[in-house]
Amino acid sequence: MKKSNIGIILGSTREGRVSPQVGEWVKKLADQRGDAHYTIIDIADYKLPLLGEAGGDASGAAAWSEIIAKQDGFVFIVQEYNHSISASLKNALDYLRVEWNDKAAGIVSYGSVGGARAAEHLRGILSELSVAHVRVHPALSLFTDFENGTELKPADVQAASVNQMLDQVIPWTTALNTIRK
């Protein structure tokens, strides 16, 4: 059976962000499983001005569309900003439509309350984009899973939670592949 492509999307573009650390940690855990091809996708690598903004350099939009279309499923690395997701992630999601449709996703969030409110906002957006999001949701606390709020040092239970999330994402991705092909 062909392995699915799972994009690990870094949902922040802010300077000093910790999403690259979280994404690398999730990818390391995921790669140990051997059940899919995991790729980190950093929205900061794509020029995506505010959707509909006049005069913006949207030269990265075609590449963004292409990389997302190649994925069979996703893991979103989501940080909580003002009780929601980052503007850059919302904008990146809004740039596309069909590229997201009929795929599965898991969410790994972080923040002062584990990013729970951001994850809940993301779930509503994903539903509108026809992305089947799974129930298990690793939530990293800035107080207990990061040293000084900047260096990822997750509790052991968090690795188990990531694997439980992937245990749901992979079969959903496989099932949804059948309706997209």
Image (cartoon, rainbow, N blue to C red):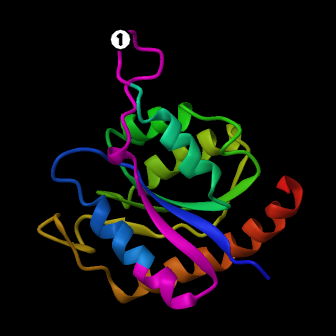
Q: Which of 62 and 82 is in front in this view?
A: 62
Work out whether 10 lies above or below 146: above
Give the residue drawn at x 62%, y 78%.
Answer: 36
> Dividing the picture into quarters, in which one does residue 48 lie?
top left
Give the residue drawn at x 31%, y 79%.
Answer: 154
Looking at the rendered structure, the number of numbered marks drawn on it comes to 1
Work out whether 104 lies above or below 131: below
Badge 1: residue crowd in 10 Å (few <14, some 14–19, many ≥20): few
Mark 1 lies on residue: 55
The location of residue 171, given as percent across then percent down, is 75, 74
Q: What residue type is labelled 1?
A: Gly
The location of residue 9, given as percent across then percent down, is 46, 56
**The C terminus lies in which quarter of the figure?**
bottom right
Work out whether 56 lies above or below 21: above
- Dot 1 falls on a residue whose secondary structure is loop
Give the residue drawn at x 78%, y 70%.
Answer: 174
User: With 65 as the anchor, is 12 left or right in this view?
Assistant: left
Give the residue drawn at x 37%, y 26%.
Answer: 49
> Dividing the picture into quarters, in which one does residue 37 lie?
bottom right
The location of residue 116, given as percent across then percent down, is 45, 55
**The N terminus lies in which quarter of the figure?**
bottom right
Q: Does the magenta stretch include residue 27?
A: no
Name the residue at the left extreme: 148
The location of residue 21, given as percent across then percent down, is 28, 68
Q: Give the range drawn in magenta.
A: 28-57
